Image: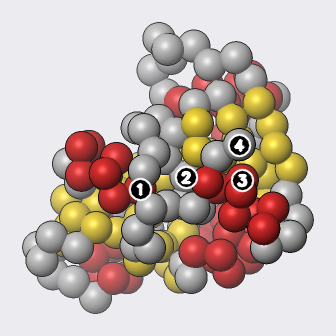
Amino acid sequence: MTPALDLLKKVRAEHRIHSYEHDPKAASYGLEAAEKLGLDPAQVFKTLLASSEKAELLVAVVPVVGSLDLKALAQAAGVKKVEMADPAAAQRATGYLLGGISPLGQKKRLRTFVDVTAQSFPTIFISAGRRGLEVELAAAVLAEHTQAKFAEIGRA
């Protein structure tokens, strides 16, 4: 179990766990998950961390088929500028290793933003906190348990 799955179990949130054999040589962990689980890549989301000009860490959840629009995230967060967070800082703040960072069950509660496209699917897939482990849940369930805001932060 991971902190993300422990949280979902504790709050009795509806979810399904999917696992696959992770290949350490995979170029993209998210695309690997979509391929190995036979999923529409648009329905698989990656968790990224960005840092504001005030050194506030922000969590961004965007489709694996696109990228994070840093300007849009800054606007959604009400800050002047954001850049990708230092990987070591991301791991320290979340308690997860890169490639397995889940927006759920992080060590420290960080402001979280989920791309609006997540709302167009009955369920989405996000990291369950370990490479090779995905959790399927409704975007609304994710938002509820991370206090996330939906915003147009992804770029195709």
Under circle 3, the secondary element is helix
The answer to the question of whether label 3 and label 2 lie on touching residues, with beta carbons closer than 8 A, is no
Within 10 Å of disc 2 (Cα), the crowding (few <14, some 14-19, many 20+) is many
Alpha carbon of mark 4 to alpha carbon of mark 1: how far?
A: 16 Å
Q: How many discs appear?
A: 4
Q: Position of residue 138 (x, y in %)?
A: 79, 66
The answer to the question of whether label 3 and label 4 lie on touching residues, with beta carbons closer than 8 A, is yes
Residue at 49 percent of width and 52 percent of height: 47
Q: How is the image coloured?
A: secondary structure
Three-letter amino acid code at the position of disc 2: Ser
Along the horizontal axis of the image, is 14 left or right of 133? right
Along the horizontal axis of the image, is 146 left or right of 99? right
* Residue projecting furthest to the bottom: 78
Alpha carbon of mark 1 to alpha carbon of mark 3: how far?
A: 14 Å
Residue at 40 percent of width and 68 percent of height: 108
The answer to the question of whether label 4 and label 1 lie on touching residues, with beta carbons closer than 8 A, is no
Most foreground residue, 118 or 128: 128
Q: Is residue 155 above or below residue 54?
A: above
Most foreground residue, 66 or 122: 122
Q: Is residue 41 above or below residue 125?
A: above
Q: Earlier in the sequence, mark 4 or mark 2?
A: 4
